[in-house]
Image (cartoon, helix red, strand yellow):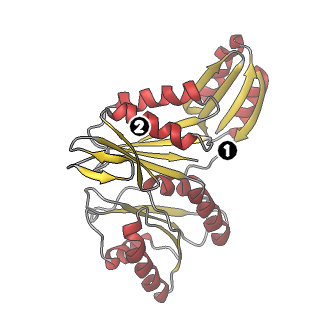
Amino acid sequence: MIYLLEADEAALGRLKERLDALGDCLVVGGGEGLWQVHVHTDDAGAAVEAGIEAGRPYRIRVSHLAPLAAEPPTQRTGGGGAAGSAGHDGDDGATTLLVRAGEQPPSGEIVEAIRRAHAREVVLLPNDPELRHPAAAAAAQARAEGVRVALIPTRAAVQGIAALAVHQPERRFDEDVVAMTSAAGATRYGELAVAERMAWTTAGICRAGDVLGLIEGDIAVIGTDLAATAADVLDRMLAAGGELVTLVLGDGVPDTLAEGLEAHVRGGHLAVDTVVHRGGGRTAPLLIGVE
């Protein structure tokens, strides 16, 4: 959960002690009497009460973070997109499974993943425009086998993460699909890539080794430094507003990049929280989502 807090700095020590005992991933940042509080906890009410004890909390936002099940052993790893699915078992439980692909997976592979979920209701998250068609074909086949399938047209992994964050297995399937679709649609996405050769782009001429900053699939920034280009992309994305930044680091990208970008966001956008994930097996050094 996240909230803003008007409080004296002297009250923060007690606040941090209480919140640290309630959960993890605690972050309290800000200054001059205004603080942003972020914590992962199963007791949102107690976290708000801790804020009331310290001062005046407001703009309270609670998100349900659905756990990811272990990845199935038959999946392939490598670059490219990732298709995810959240399955309702018809009662109170849910399973989540991922299908990664170095190339487009055949629709049959996605159907097999749906079958392994053993669920009567399944949500598919393509997370890549190239996976939309095989996911749609898999959904049609699964429906023919009696599985209720909804396809949310996510175009990037960060949109899939946003959708899974609001997934609630106890909610009616249709309502859950609406909430997940809304969260995905409200997430703008960006990406950093490294140019392999000289080429004309929408942002000008790039050369081999240049860092390319893409926003919604279009190259918006050309730079030479990964951190500086990422900060530029973030500023452009946050210019339209936002409350939460999601960073997904690729293999080999140091944690210091995320730390620097978190500090950059805190310095220029006090009311914006940042969440960092390790992507693993991706060709892109950095994925960015702004909700």
SS label for mark 2: helix
Q: Is residue 229 visible?
A: yes
- 164 over 237 or under it: above or below: below
Nearer the viewer's eye, disc 2 or disc 1? 2
Q: Is residue 84 left or right of residue 201?
A: right
Q: How many marks?
A: 2
Residue 230 numbered tag: 2
Contact? badges 2 and 1 (CB < 8 Å): no
Q: State which quarter of the image contains the N terminus.
A: top right
290 or 64: which is nearer to us? Answer: 290
Q: Earlier in the sequence, mark 2 or mark 1?
A: 1
Judge the density around disc 1: few (<14), some (14-19), many (≥20) Cα neighbours within 10 Å: some
Say what amino acid the circle numbered 2 marks: Ala
* Residue 51 spot, x, y in % from top left: 73, 27
Q: Quadrant of residue 56?
A: top right
Q: Is residue 169 visible?
A: no
Judge the density around disc 2: few (<14), some (14-19), many (≥20) Cα neighbours within 10 Å: many
Q: Which residue is label 1 attached to?
A: 62
237 or 244: which is nearer to us? Answer: 237
Q: CA distance from mark 2 to mark 1?
A: 28 Å
* Residue 106 spot, x, y in % from top left: 30, 76
SS label for mark 1: loop
Q: Quadrant of residue 53?
A: top right
Residue 29 numbered tag: none
Q: Quadrant of residue 228?
A: top left
Q: Residue at x 61, y 33 (%)?
A: 38
* Residue 220 spot, x, y in % from top left: 42, 47
Q: Residue at x 53, y 63 (%)?
A: 94
- 59 over 125 or under it: above or below: above
Q: Residue at x 58, y 33 (%)?
A: 23
Say what amino acid the circle numbered 1 marks: Val
